[in-house]
Image (cartoon, rainbow, N blue to C red):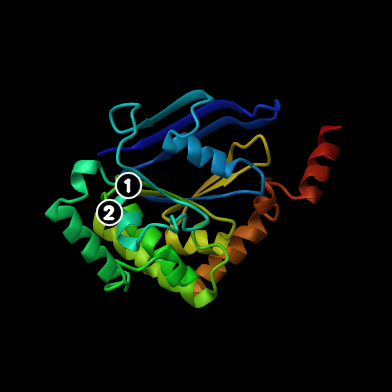
Amino acid sequence: MSSLVVDIDSKVYGNGTCAISGLHITAKQGEFVAIVGPSGTGKTTLLNIIAGIDKQFIGNMKFGESNTNKNISFMFQDSRLLPWLSVQKNIEIVLDRHDRNSVEKQSRIAELLQKVGLEGIAKSYPNQLSGGMKRRVSMVRAFVNQPQLLLMDEPFQSLDAPTAFELRTMLLELWQETKCTVILVTHSLREALTMADRVVFLSNCPANVILDYDIELPRPRQLEDNTVTLLHTNLLMQYPQILSGSLFSDSLLDKETEQSE
């Protein structure tokens, strides 16, 4: 089983700002982990480090038995489709050159397009697609190589509620089929509680883990389920400042300060 281990002692930007410090995250093969934290706390930077895009950090990143990351897919905040390429070519772009014409990969593309409700549009171009359709194409592109690790940077951002619901459902179905490890960055705690096995909460910059929370609700879950709503409410009651990057409320901090004086 391939597990993900991320140890970042320090990540400093070119301007001298320390973005991440003393951060440790693990994920088992097939686990779905959501990462939640304040804006500007380095969540996208963390994904870039895990993906191997950003190598300018002090620490260690290991997936499986080596430090070399293979078979990793990335879904971004937008679809990132090249407008001059057809849907088919936009998907094929992530394949090795010798795989692009293989019967197996062509069959895989057709199968995935059918699963996300896009059969018959392989020859279409991005400007002929709706926003939701573009995100589905990017999802197909993410799964075409049957990744062991899927990184997602707010992939449902700015979508209307019905479209986001459809895409979450499709994603979970593909995840359960492939058993890949998923790391999802989201600003929505409710989305994290609906989709993930665990939620990792990050502090304000420099980012580190302030809470690693196991979700014990059975699947399937929906955003508006009573159990999800109750868990969401209880978490925010227990940790009122968690989404701002702190485990403690201002009143608790004041009380602790008084007791220490």
**Is 101 placed left or right of 204 in the picture?**
left
Q: Position of residue 180 (x, y in %)?
A: 30, 49
Q: Earlier in the sequence, mark 1 or mark 2?
A: 1
Occupied quadrant, residue 144: bottom left
For the C terminus, give its image quadrant.
Answer: top right
Can residue 219 be seen in this snapshot? Answer: no
Can residue 200 be seen in this snapshot? Answer: yes
The residue where tag 2 is placed is: 144
Q: Position of residue 110 (x, y in %)?
A: 22, 65
Question: The residue under label 2 is which amino acid type?
Answer: Val
Q: Is 259 in front, or is 182?
A: 182
Secondary structure beneath dot 1 equals loop
Instruction: Give yes or no for contact between labels 1 and 2 (Cβ–Cβ under 8 Å).
Output: yes
Secondary structure beneath dot 2 equals loop
Q: Position of residue 77 (x, y in %)?
A: 52, 55
Question: The residue under label 1 is which amino acid type?
Answer: Val
